[in-house]
Image (cartoon, coloured by chain):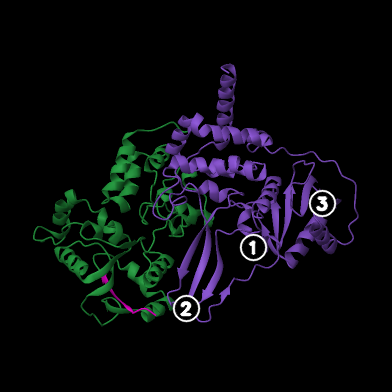
Amino acid sequence: MTKRLTIAIYDFTDCEGCEVVLSTLKENLLALEDRFDIVNWRLAQDACKDGPYDVTIIEGTPVTGDEIALLKELREKSGAIVALGACASIAGIPGIMDKGEREKWYKKIYGPEYKPIGVDSLPLAAYVRVEHMIHGCPVNAGELVRTIEELASGKKPKYRDYSVCFDCKEAGNTCRLLNDKICFGPITQGGCKAVCISGGSPCYGCFGLREDANIDGLVRILRWASSPKEIRGHLKIFFNHIPEYKDAFESALKRGRTKRP
Amino acid sequence: MWCIKTSEKEKLLTALKGAYDFRDVSSSDLPPKKLFFPEREITFTHLVKDGSVTTPPPPRKFVLYGLSLRDLEAITCLDEIMSAPEKDYYYFRRRRRALLIGVTGEAFDVPPGGDIIISSIDADTSKLLSVTEKGERAIKKHLPRLKKSKSPQAVPVKNDTMPDLRNLLMDAELLKVAVEWSWHGYKKLWEKLSRECLGCGICTYVCPLCHCFAAEDSVALSGDEAVRCRRWDACTLPVFARLGGGEDMHPGLRERYYNWFYHKFVRGYLEFGRSECVACGRCQRDCPARIDIEAVLLDIVSAYSKSAQRRRRYR
């Protein structure tokens, strides 16, 4: 067998839900311990060795100056950086923040004395090179295991090339779009098992954009039943800080409404 | 053929439910193919320890109940597809274990497939037809005292799903020629459709005849075993026709969506002499972009016919 890889698991600003998924993998966590040396994991163990690390898994959004500095330091110390969950991969929930409004809310919530420590809320890839992103809010346990398996067997982890629609059909759901409800499933990477849609919620796209997604085509359909304001509202949850998605949506929204067939 | 009362039908179904796994698919969104060709299926597991390769055990014998005539036709067609160039082991080990029961109010001259077809005649009477020996054996075993009767008269229900496409399918050659022509002869249509199609893959997942799959290999975290899984693929997805090295045979949605039609109406005709479509209507019903697939095909055939007339005129 090849040499045991060293892994470090770090977290920035987030809810730590994805680490909970990681720590509740049961027998797979034991297998992970067997194959890898987890040398640094603040949340789950006392041992916190300094790098270099073969693989650094990072959860959360680097929000403060310290977090951004640590991220850059980890890049230097790591063979590969893997983003764990939407906060790390696409800025997730911290990314909902509206930078222009921040001063006002700081004053209102924390008072005039408060000295803000937040710089911005951008995904890891805005600061450093990221080898792979495990998407999801939270991540799907199966996808997490798949990624680690691929790393362990020396493969370059792959992104899912199908849409959430595959998971959704497999789950036996009725298509939301056919019922005039907003859904980003067709343009979003699959692998999530369509848990949100099965539970009656829309797909907000936490698994990130699927390769070669037809955003124009989706907006055309959404506009039959939803206003630009509603669509932008849904977009804000996960795509607020990803200009590629936002710009594509904005230019599609500018095209106006087409006639429903 | 037998004429049975509702009580006898219930008796038969109760007996079958006891003897087999019973799957009622009459209200299922996904096509019956999933019982023979599941969304994901582990094809083999390789153990590192002893180098053995094992296949998961096949399912128990099961009854597939509630199939429409068009679904029966689709299964007959898929059986043929999965037999060429050689029999698909995984498909047929499930298929062999299935007893297919069609349920219909429609009239038919030749049964399109299945083992048993139950046609309703009126509220209390049904016609029970054994299509295969397997079906006949199942009926005789579970309803032993039934006497054969003459064909009773029923008022058939009309199936109004995609009636025009159903007619078009009668001339598979015309469909083949027209769809093939449209790629160069009716570019405008494919440009329009490539803007509308989301490439989500739903039309292939819900099609009772789409059968393309991707192979996914994984090595267990323990390093002890490797598993190959086959998963439904869709030709409208970006990686479907990508080759090693990055070359893509279908670089855009235009090529991808056209391929869906090409396989059904051109390749299907070339390989099997028929369209790989039974006009079940699922693709149209479930397309989130509301693409009217029947209208698209009618449009293609009409544009082709006009173009053919023009060509004749100038010859």
* Chain where mark 1 sits: B
Q: In the rendered structure, find residue B224 and report the number of the disc placed on it.
A: 2
Q: Are marks 3 and 2 on the same chain?
A: yes
* Chain where mark 2 sits: B
From the viewer's perspective, is residue B274 above or below residue A94? above
- Residue A16 place in picture, x, y as percent: 30, 68
Among the 4 quarters of the image, the one containing residue B191: top left
- Residue A52 place in picture, x, y as percent: 22, 75
Q: Name the residue at 28% across, 75% down.
A: A43
Query: Whole-Å distance between the Cαs marked 2 and 1?
Result: 26 Å
- Foreground: B190 or A224? B190
Q: Can residue B109 be seen at all in this image of the molecule?
A: yes
Name the main secondary structure of what is drawn in magenta: strand
Q: Are marks 3 and 2 in contact (CB under 8 Å)?
A: no
Q: Name the residue at 64% across, 45% down.
A: B271
On the rendered image, what quadrant is the N terminus of chain A found in?
bottom left
Q: Amino acid at mark 3?
A: Leu
* Image hue for chain B: purple
In the rendered image, which residue does mark 1 sit on?
B89
- Foreground: A199 or B263? B263
The mark that comes first in sequence, 3 or 2, is 3
Q: In the rendered structure, find residue B128 and report the number of the disc placed on it.
A: 3
The magenta region covers A1-10
| Crowd around label 1: few <14 · some 14–19 · many ≥20 (10 Å) | few
SS state under label 3: strand
Q: In the rendered structure, find residue A97 and report the number of the disc placed on it.
A: none
Q: Name the residue at 77% across, 50% down.
A: B118
The mark that comes first in sequence, 2 or 1, is 1
SS state under label 1: helix
Residue A5 is inside the magenta segment: yes
Q: Which chain is green?
A: A
Using residue B28 as the reference point, say whether residue A107 is left or right of it. left
